[in-house]
Image: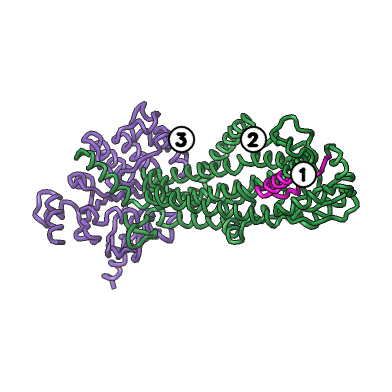
Amino acid sequence: MPHELRNIVVKELREIVRDPRLLIGMIIVPVLMMPLMGVGIRSAMEATEQQLSKMETGLLNQDEVGSHDYSDTLYRLMVQNNLVVRNSTAPDTNSAVSWALQNNLGTLVVLPPLFSENISSGKSVNVSVYQMLSHFGFDEIAGSGRMDSVFTLFNNRVLHDRLGNDYNSSNPYLPPVPANVQSQSVVKGEVLNVSPSNLINTVFTTGLLIPIAISIVIILAAQLAATSVAMEKEQKTLEVLLTLPIKRINILLGKLSGVIVVSALATIAMLLSFGYYMSSFTFAGGAQVDLAAVGLTPDMTGYALLAASLFLSIISALALAVLLAAYTKDVRSAQSLLGVLFLPIFIPAFLLMYAPIEILPAGLQAVLYAIPFSYPSIASKALYTKDYAVVALGVVYQLIFTAVVLIIAARFFASEKIMTAKLRWGRKRKAETEME
Amino acid sequence: MITQSIRFVERVSKMSTCAVAINDLVKAYSTGLKAIDGVTLTVNEGEIFGLIGPNGAGKTTTLRILGTLLKPTSGTVSILGHDVVEGQMAVRGLISYLPEDAGAYENLSGREYLAFMAGFYEGDAKKTVDIGVRIADLKERIDSRIKEYSKGMKRRLLIARALMTAPKLAILDEPTAGLDVMHALYVRERVKGLIKERGTTAVLSSHNLLEVEFMCDRVALIDHGRIHETGTPSELKEKYGAKNLEEVFMEVVKHAA
């Protein structure tokens, strides 16, 4: 390496390594983020698997057994595939659905009368499978998929029995499938005549944009606020502003309000562009479901809670960003130090995309409930599940958190720390005040 | 009895003309460093008072305490009878503070910046802005964006901002630092002229001792957070047998070390 180039590289590295704000944002945060995301996603996946293993399947068998007991064949296949099967004694399908709901079963299979006889005579029999959906999570998609596999195995077995060595599952001229699965979704006790996998896919893909868009908007707002304060410090305009006959709290609120207006515009622009993006392609995994037609459109309560949760997240992120920026002297350091905020904003959004909070391990749940930025993601899920109680409590928690952060920021602004706070690197790795 | 009465009248009369009273001021930081170590001084109304000293002597810290940006660790500081800690809002209504190397909002025009600042004071804002425009004297460039200004133009705008509201006390940290001769001369003469014309009191710091000699009625020499000399430039020159303040400064710093 030429001497001049080496000289410059060494200087650049020294500058970066000796600036704790740059190191925190550019190295420590990314180093922490990926392992934390990995741990979180692994926990989410394990929780999904655990949920699946606990999931029980109900069986309403209305078959009359003849020479072949195909209902028993199906039952055995279900058990072989690790499904915990409970037999229903309900007199009809509606009662069986109610029984399944009361007993928290994940799936209900209804075998119609003459199931075995019709299959023996080579007919295709419709079998209703009801999937109970509560949170539209991956565990529910997997539950529905597992039942599909059981029926594929069943149909292969029946055709193999019937055709013997001539059976080849890839033969396009096979007779109609023996058991034709009619999947239906049960949401909030109501039977919807739509496939659960299609419904979950639709809710997932429609709702997917919301946590991502929310995280981006919160980060953008925080960056704006941090830049605004850091720029004022860098150009010493803040120093002048703080000596004017104006209450310090008004300087803080004025700054936050300006950023909120810009953030609101950014939110609208972001949602519009994401909406266009999402509608510009179809998703793999089946046709999209018209959510309005099945009564799953979000209502005003859901939107109001999501808006409140997002608003409070933005305000608290702004106040935290202002506090972080107060520990820097220029825009570059402020932007870098802001990386600290990325962890609590992005990690909950990503985790809650994979698994609903209620199926996660208790420790992880506690962490997510403690992070105020989790609630917009929880609220966006609640648009479809209509589980508003947790979101409402979350909004109250966010309100308290935001008030506390605002009070701290206001006190910080009112004190001389706004002028003197800086991060120290070395033996005292903590923020403290010092003469400039 | 008569002597005591005369002393009382002298003290009351001194108090009434005292714009800034600093008494045994100490400012220490968490690192243990004492930026100011027992400063006591007074600045009379209508006076231009200069703080001179080497880098890190405590000049900016003193000015920031006067500007209510920092709080004293101990001692008292009052401006026109208002304590800078207890009565900071009242103090902020009386002062105008100009930091060294201060900037302005780059995306505003000079006129918009003055209007923004005038909005925080009572009285006719438009009239205040007109005064500011006259002080800055940037001609038609007053309506250009500040980011297009040279350093000298920016400083003229900031001086105009600091003086347009007719503050009772102007606190100016290095008012001409980094300016070319033309702009420095303009700022120096404009500041002195306006302050004397309006009877404003000013406390300023500067490394340019010729400037201090030209502008200030009295000066204090500060080093390591302590005042080593106070007096009019001519008193100090006479005391040290020096031709100018630079020689006085060197003598004082030498003895202080």
| Observer-nearest of A80 and A105 | A80
User: Which residue is labeled 2 in the image?
Assistant: A284
Amino acid type at circle 2 is Ala
Please report contact status of discs 2 and 1: CB closer than 8 Å, yes or no: no
For the point 45% across and 39% down, the residue is B116
Q: Is residue B216 above or below residue A432?
A: above
Regarding mark 1 in the picture, which secondary structure is present there? strand
The chain to which mark 1 is attached is: A
Percent x, y of residue A200 = 69, 42
Dot 2 crowding, Cα within 10 Å, few <14, some 14–19, many 20+: few
**Amino acid beneath label 1:** Ser
Q: Which chain is green?
A: A
- Tell me what hue chain B is rendered in: purple
* Residue corresponding to mark 1: A185
Circle 3 SS class: helix
Q: Which mark is residue B126?
A: 3
Which residue is the extreme one toward the top? B140
Dots 3 and 1: beta carbons under 8 Å?
A: no
Instruction: Residue at 64%, 47% (x, y): give it.
Output: A308
**Residue A86 quadrant:** bottom right
Residue placed at 79% from the left, 45% from the top?
A129
The vertical placement of A429 against B2, above or below, is above
Specify start and end residues of the magenta stretch as a single range. Answer: A125-150
Q: Kindly give the residue lying farthest to the front in the view shown.
A: A165
Q: Secondary structure at mark 2?
A: loop
Q: Chain of mark 3?
A: B
